[in-house]
Image (spheres, helix red, strand yellow):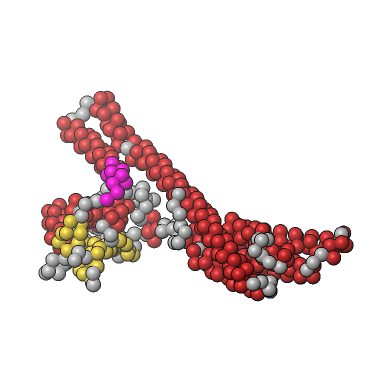
Amino acid sequence: MDYYFFSAPQHSSVPALQQEYARQNLRKLKLVGYLAMTVSCGILLLPLLFPVLNQTAHVQFFRGLNIALVFASALFLCLQESLFPAEDLSFRPWLAQALCLAFALVFVSCCLGVTFIAQSNPKNTLTMYLLGLVTVAFLWEFEYYQTLVLMGLTTAVFSQVLRFCHLSTEQILLNHCLNFLIMACFFVLSRFMYSFRAAHFIQLQEIEKKNQRIQEISQAKSEILGVVAHDLRSPFNNIEMIISLLQKQNSTPEQEQKYLDLILTSCQSSRDTINELLYVAREDDQQDIPLEKLDLCALLQHVHQEWQAHLQGTRSLQLQHPPEPLYAHLNKERFFRVMNNLVSNAVKFTPANGSITLRVGQKNRTLHLEVSDNGIGIPEKLKPHLFDRFSKARRRGLKGEKSTGLGLNICRQLVERHGGSLEVDSEEKKGTTFRVTLPAAV
């Protein structure tokens, strides 16, 4: 376990930790407030049952102290209910901490008052004072600086109490030494409890994250099985049906060739689905990818040339880039896959003689890359699901091309691993533009 005596945990869960212990502190304030009111009221009623108690020394001061504790507890409970109804912190954990800090000071001061009553000299009767400080250390979690504030205010109250004790200079000095020792013990105990609870909370957060990750993996596994069951079953059914036809009838060589072409198409579709699934699994397992400084313009020229040859003039593919190189830290293989996926997506949904444009430029220290087309666009209802894994937005291309629903999810995942982002703008029947932003290499 890590100890946080002079600092707070350096962890992503710290904001949640602060919210949680502020909420818990309010609950403990309510508990101690009601308990203090009950005990003080009981002490005030005791002289009615035992009149002899009215003859004890300092009885009026003792009675006044209990009355003050009752009213102070009631005041703090009312403030808590009015400021934090239903424990709603509303982004004000600092106010909850301030309220608990003030109540802790009042509670310790009352305990110190009881100590003063016993002998008018707290040097030998620090039991209630110690009990108050131990109660605060065990119940409430305060930040390092909040603990120091509470210690400073408590020491100030202790010094004021000593002024009413009519002690010698030697006794006052001795009491201050004892108080310093007590404050040191209070600090260690308070920070130890804070460290223990903080470590426990962070551990619970880590367990929750791991459980969430396990659920995500389990869900992904179910989705993969669903894709395998659906997308692979159809090609295999087609192959089985075609082979049955070949076995049952005498086909001409032309028909046989047509059947064989259908079998080949089904096999290729199954292979593409399996390759996509394997690629996703491999990328999920790999934490970091190797990057190198590359000219993005040169990479786009390579993509442009390959797709120009593939399209054979069926669609216009243009590349716009500045004359000077634009450098970025890229993984060539993976970013090439991103560009191929985006261009392939544009080709699938752009009719013959349509236009596709690759455009890249730099603004400040950011590279802006666009893949735009004047195709059929994306329906509004599909946009929220566009980048989901096994997306509900997957649909067949204009020529019946199938989609696994993984391509755009892979693209966004790879772009984010390059430190960039991938967004989309689209209007149905007018076209789509995918926008990639990347940090420029120095």
Left or right: where does residue 362 sit relative to residue 102? left
Residue 266, given in percent of the width and then of the height, sits at 26, 38
Question: Depth check: 8 or 340 in front?
Answer: 8
Q: Quadrant of the C terminus?
A: bottom left
Left or right: where does residue 208 sit relative to residue 323? right
| Residue name at image x 66 percent, y 71 percent | 167
Q: Is residue 196 above or below residue 319?
A: above
Residue 300, given in percent of the width and then of the height, sits at 16, 59
Question: Depth check: 156 or 392 in front?
Answer: 156
Query: Total marks drawn?
Result: 0
Instruction: Write down the quadrant of residue 440 in the picture.
Output: bottom left
Question: Depth check: 191 or 234 in front?
Answer: 191
Q: Is residue 112 visible?
A: yes
Q: Is residue 346 above or below residue 324?
A: above
Instruction: Write down the quadrant of residue 436 in the picture.
Output: bottom left
Residue 150, given in percent of the width and then of the height, sits at 56, 67
- Magenta span includes 412: no
Q: Would you say the magenta stretch is mainly helix, strand or loop? A: helix
Residue 33, given in percent of the width and then of the height, sits at 68, 62
Q: Is residue 140 above or below residue 278?
A: below
| Residue name at image x 49 percent, y 55 percent | 195
| Residue name at image x 58 percent, y 63 percent | 178
Question: Depth check: 204 or 412 in front?
Answer: 204
The span shown in magenta is 278-288
Q: Is residue 360 visible?
A: no
Left or right: where does residue 223 sit relative to residue 151? left
- Magenta span includes 283: yes
| Residue name at image x 30 percent, y 34 percent | 236
Instruction: Write down the quadrant of residue 182 in the picture.
Output: bottom right
